[in-house]
Amino acid sequence: ILDVLLEFVKNNVHNQLQVRLHTLVMSLFHRVLCWQKQHHFCLKKFRWDALWKQMFRLLGFLSKDEWFKRPEVLELVQAMSTILNLFI
C-alpha cells in the first residue's frame, strides 16, 4: 500500500495538481504509519528516504505563491506536517 501511495505522490506533482487526492493520500499515509507505531510493526523493506524526499519535494512545490493562497492546499500541508511530526 505504501509503495503505491508513494508512486502516486512521485508521479503526480505537476501544474495541474489534484490537491484533494494528495490530501487523501497523505491521510492514508498517516493512518498506516499510526497503525505501524501502535502495533510496533517495523517496515524494513519500505524506502523511507523516498517518502521523505517526495514529501519535501511536494512541500517545495506547494510553497509557490499561486498554490499557497488556496485553502485546500493548507489542509494538505497540515496533513503532511502531521506525518513529519510523527517521526520527530
Image: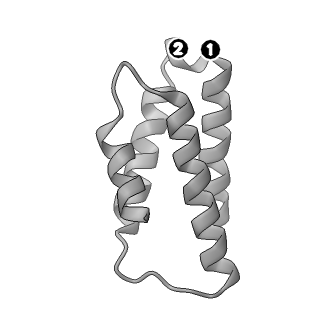
Q: Is residue 76 above or below residue 1?
A: above
Within 10 Å of disc 2 (Cα), the crowding (few <14, some 14-19, many 20+) is few
Q: Residue 64 location in percent, x, y?
A: 48, 19
Image mark for residue 26: none
Colouring mode (rainbow / by chain / secondary structure / one colour): one colour
Total labels: the figure holds 2
> Which residue is label 1 attached to?
69
In the orientation shown, which residue stands out farthest toward the left? Answer: 11
Residue at (53%, 29%) from the top-left corner?
A: 19
Name the front one of labels 1 and 2. Answer: 1
Secondary element under disc 1, as helix, strand or loop, is loop
**Residue 56 appears in which quarter of the rendering?**
top left
Work out whether residue 29 or residue 81 is closer to the camera in this orientation and state it. 29
What kind of residue is marked 1?
Lys
Residue 84 shows up from this direction: no
Q: Residue 78 location in percent, x, y?
A: 68, 40
Quadrant that contains the C terminus: bottom right
What kind of residue is marked 2?
Asp
Q: Is residue 15 above or below residue 88?
A: above
Q: Residue 36 location in percent, x, y?
A: 60, 77
In the displayed structure, does residue 3 sit left or right of residue 23?
A: left
Quadrant that contains the N terminus: bottom left
**Residue 6 appears in which quarter of the rendering?**
bottom left
Q: State the separation of the CA atoms marked 1 and 2.
A: 6 Å
Query: Is the residue under label 2 in contact with that under label 1 (CB below 8 Å)?
Result: yes
Residue at (38%, 48%) from the top-left corner?
A: 54
Residue at (43%, 64%) from the top-left corner?
A: 2
> Which residue is label 2 attached to?
65
Residue 8 shows up from this direction: yes
Q: Is residue 76 above or below residue 63?
A: below
In the displayed structure, does residue 44 sit left or right of residue 11?
A: right
